[in-house]
Image (cartoon, rainbow, N blue to C red):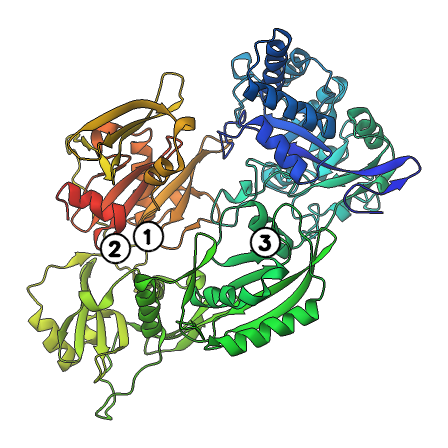
Amino acid sequence: MSQNGNGTAGGMRWFRADLHIHTPASEDYAEPDITFLDILQEAERRGLDIIAFTDHNTVHGYELMRQEIEFLQTLERQQRITQEEQSRLNEYRRLLARISVLPGFEFTSHYGAHILGIFAPDRPISLIEATLLQLGVPPDLLKKGACSIADTRHVTDAYEIIHRAGGIVIAPHANGPNGVITETLRMGTSGQARVAATQHPALHALEFINFYTDHEKFTSPTFYNGKTEHYERRMFCIQGSDAHRLRRVNAGEGNGWHRHGIGDRYVEFLLPSPTFAALKELFASHDFDRVRVPKRDQKQWEIDTLRFGAHNDRQALRPESAIDTLWQDVAALANVGGGTLIISGTGAELTGVEHPEQLSETLRRSVQERLTPHPYLTFELIGYEGRDLLRVEVRATESPPYVGSNGVIYTRQGGETVIADRTEIIQLCRRALAEGAATPLDNGQDLDLPRSGVEIVEAQKRAGVWLYEVRDLRTTSGVTRDHAQGLWAYAISRYEDVREGRIDLQSQVKWKGRLGLWRAYRQGNRTKYDLVHRDANGVIDHIFFGVSDWGLSPSWQALIGDRASDTLEHEPRSFGDDAPGDPDVFEEPVNGAAPWGDRRPRWRGRGGVWRIGRDAQGKVYFDLIMRSKEGNEVKEYPGVPREKLTEAWMNLIRVPRPRTGIEVVEIIVDEFGERRFVFRNLRTGELSNAPWRLQDIEEGTVRQYAARMALQDMPLDESRVRWWGNLGYMRPMRKQVDLVYRDENGIDHIYYAARRDELSGEWRELLDEYGEL
């Protein structure tokens, strides 16, 4: 039987379902401007036959969709419907004839475990809300989609209440956060309580995350096969997407627990029809063979992201018909450090590869003949939705640039392969110099090494991870950024800034002969130096990080002595030193400073942004301005709604994040009322693996500073910000500054402790506008 719902057996067929989908009615939905038509269209694109709207402690999402459809039907009956409204109504009819949409909710029980209640489409909304009231959801929160609600019913009580109300009862993400299995393990309750939470007669199914990779006791689907002592009831085990957005995003782009999109984790049921009644009849039976959970690997997720997600400069999807230009994609991927090329058809339908062996050989020969140097290629044929695709992994084994036989250098930009411009070529060459092997000294003498600090001797990229040879005069070892600590982490971070072209090293060094002082900074009660050495050709061949005074030889001391009057920086303890008891200090703003602010327009060409705000109903509006062609007249456009903005205006409003500082992405209040913080390191773009408690954050670090300031800053007081359109700054310090970005959705992002000397683009222009540089 087919995997996509086309197979039949005894009058039945396989239907694809996702019974755990959120809508903007949930307060933590990642894309609040998404419409219900968007959700249904994405469900159709993913081949789903049955979906359930399961918003947090509310059925309001399903209710809003029904209200929209009923309003359009009323307009149609009264012959008052516009062409655009008729088109939406027709699309709703088409999609609802194709997809069964079930109303439901995700209830938060007394100790925080979640429970799905799913109902028939003809069940009145008022009766479903009456069930939520029985479960303990306060009347004033019935429409709010709140994630956390106090004093609700316990897990097993909730099972029975939902079951008596005629609903299907599912324990979602049972082995994940806020799951019934995880809750019993966390609470340390008895085995009897764990049995009740997973074997209760009113519970229809358990939903698992990491369905095929989690094999621990209590947390694996195979544990509930009816053969485990005290767990004699065999359970239906399924998976659901828990989608809080339309399409999946990669790690680091969203909350780690809300990265999946609609249909990413689906289940298939063998049913006579895709209805609630058929589904409930199955869950009441013992026909476990009528449920199957398809297994998908990371490479298939990768293709999903390429097809439906945001642009990615490290991945490319190309048709087999483009064989003559595929070598250019390989060159571009090599020039950005490596990536993957997927070869098949493009668009909504992938055609697959007809002659993979021939295609592989042709591409390999084309790269050998047309590209210098030659990147390392690996070819793999992978299955995707019943088709064979060719996955080509491109590894950059030598420093860039990789140059085509036509003399052109290609790179990746906005998800496309393009010809590199002059600036990009310079950056590639600088990166090559930064990655190059050490140049021998022309006098044949050994380099006078400092006696403290560390040096990055070599960097290699293996399986997508940079490995570094770090010399600290005691040992040399291969480490990654994730495993480095203290001074090693600091050295790797600064080294990567040079390699990626984020810092122009040559312009920042003070030279004395071949010895150079890059940076001198104060760390607690110690002075540290970043030092460089250049060979006879003027090429930097050694960089030493975090050298202490006592580690300087006479020649280095002479260099430092000449710069003794230079002002010292203060280094925040985000990296710190590995010396015990080193009392590093973060540069704090002056306490008690009076509020201050200003607002100036931010121009690009003739268009300008004055303000982004929200009206009394919370809807985002834009105050825009426009110069005349002659430049002598300015026209104002106040209160422009988002849907009226062209792409040109959106490109003006959108500004990339700075590559320095820390962002507090989210402040979570857990079931115990304790605040937890999710951070983004702007240098790497990575999110913290798990939310931090304030008391667990090391004293004096940038992370602690960002957490404390975030509690003080949100919601943002605009009188404390100096605005340049939708960009701003506050609390300027000597070496750092706190930056503000208000995005196209009216959401404020604060970037704490951004280093002034590393700012570029609009962020540098912002400070220049106010004379802060």
Where is residue 189, by image quadrant? top right
Residue 578 visible, this orientation: no
Where is residue 588, by image quadrant? top left
What amino acid does circle 1 point to?
Arg
Residue 414 appears at what percent x and percent y? 44, 52
Q: CA distance from mark 3 to mark 1?
A: 25 Å
User: How many C-alpha atoms fall within 10 Å of the one at disc 2: few (<14), some, or many (≥20)?
Assistant: some
In the image, 163: left or right of 521? right
**What secondary structure is found at the residue carrying circle 3?**
helix
Q: Of marks 2 and 3, which one's residue comes earlier in the chain?
A: 3
Q: CA distance from mark 1 to mark 2?
A: 8 Å
Q: Quick check: marks 1 and 2 in contact, CB under 8 Å?
A: yes
User: How many C-alpha atoms fall within 10 Å of the one at disc 3: few (<14), some, or many (≥20)?
Assistant: some
Q: Which residue is mark 1?
A: 659
Which of the numbered marks, if any, corresponds to residue 758? 2
What residue is rendered at 74% in x and 22% in y? 167
Q: Which residue is mark 3?
A: 302
What residue is rendered at 18% in x and 68% in y? 509
Q: Of marks 3 and 1, which one's residue comes earlier in the chain?
A: 3
Rendered view: 250 above or below 594: below
What residue is rendered at 42% in x and 37% in y? 666
Q: Quick check: marks 2 and 3 in contact, CB under 8 Å?
A: no
Rendered view: 364 above or below 527: below
In the image, 312: left or right of 551? right
Rendered view: 242 above or below 363: above
Residue 582 appears at what percent x and percent y? 26, 59
